[in-house]
Amino acid sequence: MPIIITRDRTRVIINDTAEPECDPITVGYDPVTYVTTESDGSVTLTVRVFSHPGGAPRPFTLAINTQDGTATVADDDYVPVDGEIIQFNAGDVTQTHTITINDDDECEKDPNENFFSNIALDSGIPDITVTVPQATVTIDDTAEPECAPITVGYDPATYMTTESDGSVTLTVRVFSHPGGAPRPFTLVVNTQDGTATVADGDYVAVAGEIIQFNAGVVTQTHTIGINDDDECENDPNENFFSIIALDSGIPDIIVTVPRATVTIDDTSEPECGLTFFVNDTLTGDPLLTVPIWTNPTVELGDPVESLCYEVHGEDGSYFNLISDECTSVNAYYQEAVTPSPNINLNVVTQIGVMARGDTACWNIQVDLDGCNTTINGGLSLGTDFDGISVKRYATSSRVRISVPNCGDTMLVMWVFCRAGQVEDPVTWDYFDIRFIRFVVMRGLNLNEQSHGLIGQFWNVPVTVSSYTGLFGGAERSDDYVITVDHPQSDPRSFVGLKYSVTWEFEKRVCYYVGNTQAGELSEVSDPNPNDSVIEGDYTDYKVDSLFATDFKFSHFDGNRC
């Protein structure tokens, strides 16, 4: 430094302005961008002295504050910093500070959220310039386990249930993460008709039900109600579908198995078992199938075999099918309408039920046309009254009728309004016909007092033995003698041909015993045994109207009405 001598006194001026330690200091973030993850737990930021590569020439302090970006303190994405002090001592080139990152087990809608860290001079420090005052911190969620795509779906995708189960429970599984869902999500469930339908009362519809998966959950279940309608379906294995879809606003969830099939197996239901009374017209005039009890060790009410016979009746006539003390069922016979003069078949076109309810008697009529149903003359789509239930399934042309039958046991009947085809015996052409199929599911009185064209066989002991005579002029090994021993009638015996299926092609032993009117069999060469299949003659079962109860073998007690 220069030395100036003036007179006898010396003044030394020390000029520090040119000294390095007096140079202005520039400082800031370096680098200015940082990428971290939630699982890192924190991020460390660096503040550098730019102006002095050898370090800060003098001490100074900076203040730090964080600032929300798309990542926010309110969403618990990071821990805020407010006024934290960074101390630079002389010689320091860099200092660091750390910000805590929260791991919230949530995959953010924006997988690269960010926030900012700001530095500013602490007060009263001259010649310090913050040239890079802000750093950007990005929280990258894309590599987090909770952000990995989730695959989910039904497992299994097929379910078998029965009507008597009352419900079926379906399972939805997270496939992609064996340890459970990495983050919460929701699914929406809806059912869809198959051959089983809501309109037919087969199952209870589900619309918009929510399934909630929380973090760590592997499976969730939901339940669908199955209705027991006391009907053996035309298709014994009807099905419907359950469909899951994502609830709105959930990213990276893939439903890989969105649909489950539920099959309702009716084959094991009581109504699909051995307690059928059926008339049908698929292969001829009204055909009847009734259960019989051939084993004295088997309790009445548990039949193991059946009789198959015919009662063609007469066009324009009413015949009684069932006559109990409190219930009477009649059928109206009409000639089937076809364009062929060669087809002369009678079919049932009306069913009339007179039933004793809890307080009064009621007339229930079902017509072939649309299965239209009336109760005491008033149209009914389905109702419960006086202990009686009548339900009409318009979409499938069927009606369920349940009556208390003197309170012994509920008598459950179905009326099906059906279409079929019959073959012209001359031209071999097929023609459409329409007819009623009447089915008794369960509940004829157990007091052995039933009668009618089909009711007379209910709970009546029957014995079966081999027939050694001639049938159709020839000896056969599959013919049997059936003896009916009704407690109120004389025993009668007739010959039947044993088959393993019924008129309806159900797999059940059935003895085919019917000629056109269930009388004596012309094929039997021997005069004995060859009694009528039904008691008396078919004309003994004619009644005057659809609700008339008087005929030769009537058991209906009109005084109860």
Image: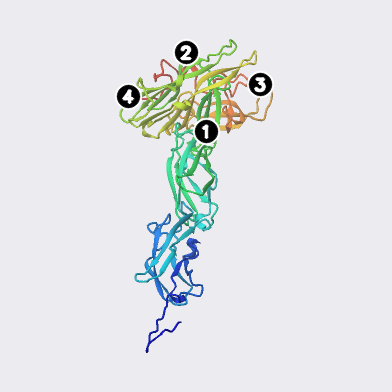
Regarding residue 12, the answer to whether it shows in the image is yes
Residue tagged 1: 195
Looking at numbered disc 1 in the image, what kind of residue is underneath it?
Thr
Q: Residue furthest right?
A: 474
Q: Earlier in the sequence, mark 2 or mark 4?
A: 2
Does 548 appear above or below 3?
A: above
Q: Which mark is in front, 2 or 4?
A: 2
Instruction: Categorize mark 3 by other alpha carbons within 10 Å: few (<14), some (14-19), many (20+).
Output: few
Q: Secondary structure at mark 4?
A: helix
Way the structure is coloured:
rainbow
Q: Residue furthest front?
A: 7
Residue 559 disc label:
4
Instruction: Categorize mark 1 by other alpha carbons within 10 Å: few (<14), some (14-19), many (20+).
Output: some
**Residue 335 % position (x, y):** 52, 14
Examine the image and state in which quarter residue 2 appears.
bottom left
Instruction: Categorize mark 2 by other alpha carbons within 10 Å: few (<14), some (14-19), many (20+).
Output: few
Residue tagged 2: 316
Q: Secondary structure at mark 3?
A: loop
Q: Residue placed at 62% from the left, 21% from the top?
A: 524
Residue 472 disc label:
3
Looking at numbered disc 2 in the image, what kind of residue is underneath it?
Gly
Distance in Å between CA atoms under marks 4 and 1 = 45 Å
Looking at numbered disc 4 in the image, what kind of residue is underneath it?
Asn
Examine the image and state in which quarter residue 429 appears.
top right
Does 514 appear above or below 198?
A: above
